[in-house]
Image (cartoon, rainbow, N blue to C red):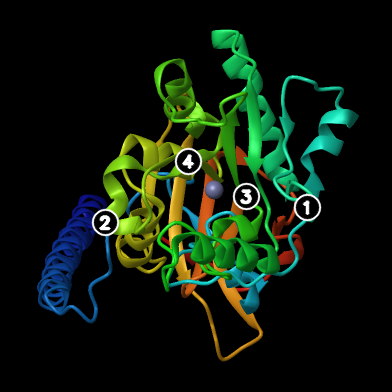
């Protein structure tokens, strides 16, 4: 009996133990439930507070460099160079301050290049028929291409660089001839584009009467391809204050000649447009694409007249040029398709200037 009793007692102990374990387990589960519920409620309450909200981890797309984002770096130029460069405006309001033009003799260069198609005719013994170095090649190429297109070979260069003294003598001679007190045909000394060496006049021989008519209209239509403009166009006399001069060509560089020609703007209108609408800090810069798909960006930077140097923002890694306007600052021309890898060095009328690549950059 004792044995079964013992067994049943043992069984009942085990049952009790099992029941207790079950109870314990349920209690733990229950308690855990409350704890978890509490945490959940608390965490829910806490979750509503922005201070403790932990943002869901978001898998970020790897950031690709934006090819359209332009990074600018600073480039320093001498403030006085605002009076020099391809885009200077020289007219009755803005006088030319002669300086460091790099002049070459047209006839000497022709001789060096063994070119006999055209020559410069010296209208006076003192004038050497010089032109700014970089203008010689576009001028010569235009005359050669005209010959290829028309087989006409009677072109002469009849006017090029003039010293201020020579301009004065032309002015005086005109007053003498007309008897007037002011000349309407010859610019005052200091106010002729010829003093910059960036302009030249074409004529024909033997008549010396170039009018840009007939086959010669080729020059008017094609000069922009060489970075040249007819500086005093037919319908812009009210703006330029100079009569139509189909023979007077002015070098401004291809992008600008292209834009002015396609948009029927004379130099006064173009410079005024860039200065007033396309300041560096304006919402947009002047951007355009030529017939070959080359892209350009053009903008204006005010000169820092309180300092010898003006800091100019230029895009990193792109070819650019800086020119004075002869008005109140500089125009930057960016060749967007032309990458440069080394720190840019460019020239403003022969003065070497450098770009700081380590200074602050701005983005647009
Ligand atoms: Zn001229």
Give how far apart the Cα atoms at labels 2 and 4 are.
Answer: 18 Å
What label does residue 238 carry, if any? 2
Give how far apart the Cα atoms at labels 4 and 3 are.
Answer: 29 Å
Q: For the residue labelled by badge 1, is the local secondary structure a helix, a strand or a loop?
A: strand
- Which residue is the site of mark 1? 103
The residue sitting at the right extreme is 112
Label 2 or label 1, whichever comes before in sequence order: 1
Q: For the residue labelled by badge 2, is the local secondary structure a helix, a strand or a loop?
A: helix
Q: Nearer the viewer, residue 124 or 338?
A: 124
Give how far apart the Cα atoms at labels 3 and 1 are.
Answer: 31 Å
Give how far apart the Cα atoms at labels 4 and 1 are.
Answer: 20 Å
Asked whether the residues under the numbered discs 4 and 3 touch, taking CB atoms below 8 Å apart as contact, a structural biologist would say no
Q: Which quarter of the figure is the C terminus placed in?
A: bottom left
Image location of residue 46, percent across then percent down? 16, 78
- Tell me which residue sits at (32%, 52%) in the image: 58
- Which residue is the site of mark 4? 229
Mark 3 Cα-neighbour bin, 10 Å: few <14, some 14–19, many ≥20: some
């Amino acid at each position: 009996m004792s044995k079964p009793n013992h067994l049943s007692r043992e069984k009942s102990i085990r049952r009790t133990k099992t029941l207790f374990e079950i109870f314990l387990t349920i209690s733990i589960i229950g308690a855990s439930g409350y704890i978890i519920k509490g945490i959940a409620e608390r965490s829910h309450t806490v979750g509503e507070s922005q201070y403790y909200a932990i943002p869901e981890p978001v898998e970020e797309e790897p950031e690709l460099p934006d090819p359209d984002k332009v990074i600018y770096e600073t480039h320093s130029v001498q403030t006085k160079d605002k009076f020099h460069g391809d885009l200077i405006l020289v007219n009755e309001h803005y006088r030319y301050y002669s300086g460091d033009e790099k002049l070459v003799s047209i006839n000497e260069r022709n001789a060096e290049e063994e070119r006999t198609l055209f020559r410069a005719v010296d209208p006076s013994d003192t004038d050497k028929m010089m032109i700014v170095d970089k203008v010689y090649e576009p001028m010569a190429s235009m005359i050669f291409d005209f010959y290829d297109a028309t087989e006409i070979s009677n072109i002469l260069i009849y006017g090029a660089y003039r010293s201020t003294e020579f301009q004065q003598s032309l002015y005086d001679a005109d007053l003498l001839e007309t008897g007037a007190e002011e000349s309407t045909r010859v610019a005052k000394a200091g106010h002729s584009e010829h003093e910059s060496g960036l302009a030249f006049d074409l004529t024909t021989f033997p008549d010396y009467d170039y009018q840009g008519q007939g086959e010669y209209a080729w020059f008017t239509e094609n000069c922009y391809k060489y970075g040249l403009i007819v500086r005093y166009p037919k319908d812009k006399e009210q703006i330029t204050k100079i009569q139509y001069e189909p023979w007077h060509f002015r070098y401004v560089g291809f992008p600008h000649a292209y834009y002015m020609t396609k948009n029927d703007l004379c130099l006064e209108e173009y410079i005024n447009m860039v200065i007033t609408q396309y300041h560096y800090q304006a919402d947009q810069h002047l951007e355009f694409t030529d017939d070959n798909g080359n892209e350009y960006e053009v903008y204006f930077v005010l000169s820092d007249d309180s300092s010898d140097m003006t800091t100019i923002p230029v895009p990193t890694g792109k070819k650019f040029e800086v020119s004075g306007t002869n008005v109140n600052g500089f125009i930057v021309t960016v060749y967007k398709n032309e990458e440069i890898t080394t720190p840019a060095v460019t020239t403003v009328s022969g003065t070497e200037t450098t770009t700081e690549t380590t200074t602050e950059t701005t983005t647009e």
